Image (tube, rainbow, N blue to C red):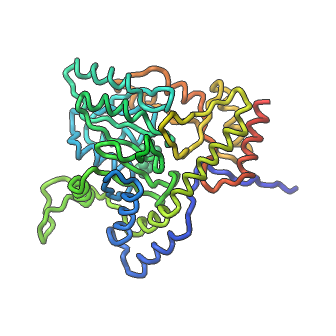
Amino acid sequence: METTVLKKIWLSPPHMGGNEETYVKEAFDTNWIAPLGPNVQHFEKSIENFIGNNVYAACLSSGTGAIHLGLELLGVGPEDEVICQSFTFAASANPITYLGATPIFVDSENETWNISPELLEEAINDRLSKGIRPKAIVAVHLYGMPYKVDEVHAVAKKYGIPIVEDSAEALGSSYRGFNCGSFGDYGILSFNGNKIITTSGGGALLCNDQESKEKAVFLATQARDNAPHYQHSKIGYNYRMSNILAGIGRGQMEVLNDRVEARRRNYSFYNEHLSDLQEIEFLQEPDGSYSNRWLTCILTPSFEIREKLRLALEAENIESRPLWKPMHLQPVFEKNVSFVNGVSEDLFNRGLCLPSGSSLEVEDLERICGIIKNELK
Ligand SMILES: *Cc1c(COP(=O)(O)O)cnc(C)c1O
C-alpha cells in the first residue's frame, strides 16, 4: 500500500537570499574564522543604515545576550526590580534574573497585544509606594506589532525609568515612521532561526551612542583591560558574534525588505480568505504602526476551537502554535509580582499563530485556509 506524505509546512523556517554563502566563503578564503572581522563590521553597518535614527549596533551571539548586556549597562543588579511585559517569550524576562534582579510582570492592552501603558503606570506607582524604584522596563513589539511607543515611553519618562526595547520579532516594523529598535535606551534584535532574518543564531544590541556600543562590546568580549597580558577589572561575557555567522547576516540584510513584504502578503492572504468566517479575528495595525507581520496570528472564539484547528493542521503536516504563554502564568515565575487584567491570558487561550514563513507559496496558503474553513463549517 502506498502512503503519500503531505508536504510539511513549518511555522517560520529560515529563508536564505543567495549571497550568504559568498560572504561566508569570503571569511573562509581569508581565514577570518575567528570572532570579529570584516563581516561583523559590514553586518553592523547595514543594520545601522537600515534602522537609522543614529543607532549603533553591536552584533552578539543571541538576542537574549543583548537583553542581558542592555540591562547590565543600565545598572540593573541584585535586589533590583525590572518591569517586564508579561505577554512575551521567556527570553525577554530571563536575563533579568541572570543579574540577580526580579522581574515584575505587566499585562497587555487589546489594540497591539503589548504592554498596557495604564497598567504600567499602576505597577510603577505600586512599587514606588512600597519604597522600590523599578530599575528598568522591558517592552516588547510582539509578533512584529509595535507597542504603544508614545504612551509607554511617556510613562517611563514621567518616572525616569529607562526602557530596553525588545525588537527581536520586529525588525522591519516601524512606528510613526521610525524603525522599531530605535526607541529604547537600548534596543535588541534577534537573528534566531525562526525570526524574519536569521544568522542561524545571533542578535544585536542597538545603542544610542558610540560609547555605549563600545561598553557593550567590551563586556561581550570578556571585559579585557587595555594591557598586553590578559587583565580583568570586571566580569565579562563571551557574547560576540562570529565572523562566519555575520556573513550570513550580511546576505540576509540584502533581502530584508523582500522578507517583510512576503510576510505582510501572508497576513493579507489569510485576512482575505478567512475574513468571511465570523469566528476568526485578526490583529489590525493601529494608525501610525507598520508591522513586519513576523507571524500571522488569529483569535478563535474559544480554547476548544483553537485546539481543534491546531490539531487539524497538525494532522495535515502543518505546524501552527498557540500564542505565547504569558510569563505571569509560567511555573517558574508564579511567585513574581504581576499586574494582570486578563488580556494576555485570553489571547493565550484563544489565539493561534499560522504558518508565516517568507517562502510560503500560494498553494500552501490555500491548503491551510482550506483546512481551517473545513473545520469551521
Ligand atoms: C527570539 C526572541 C528573543 C531572544 O532572542 P534569541 O536570539 O533567540 O536569544 C527575545 N525576545 C523575544 C520576544 C523573542 O521572540
Q: Nearer the viewer, residue 51 or 107?
A: 51
Q: Residue at x 32, y 53 (%)?
A: 55
27 sits to left or right of 98: right
Residue 233 % position (x, y)? 12, 56
Quadrant (top left/top right/bottom left/bottom right) for the N terminus: bottom right
Point out the residue furthest to the right here.
1
For the C terminus, the image quarter is top right
Q: How many marks?
A: 0
Q: Which residue is found at the position 23% from the left and 58% from the top?
A: 214
Report whether residue 236 is seen: no
Quarter of the image holding residue 303? top right
- For residue 230, above or below residue 195: below
Instruction: Tell me: 194 left or right of 53.
Output: right
Nearer to me, 361 or 4: 361
The residue at 35%/37% (across/down) is: 138
Q: Position of residue 17 (x, y in %)?
A: 56, 65
Q: Position of residue 284 (x, y in %)?
A: 57, 34
Q: Is residue 83 above or below residue 43?
A: above
Q: Is residue 367 visible?
A: yes
Look at 75% across and 46% down and name the residue there.
366
Above or below 82: residue 75: below
Q: Position of residue 94 (x, y in %)?
A: 36, 40
Question: In the depicted view, which residue is nearer to us: 362 or 242?
Answer: 362
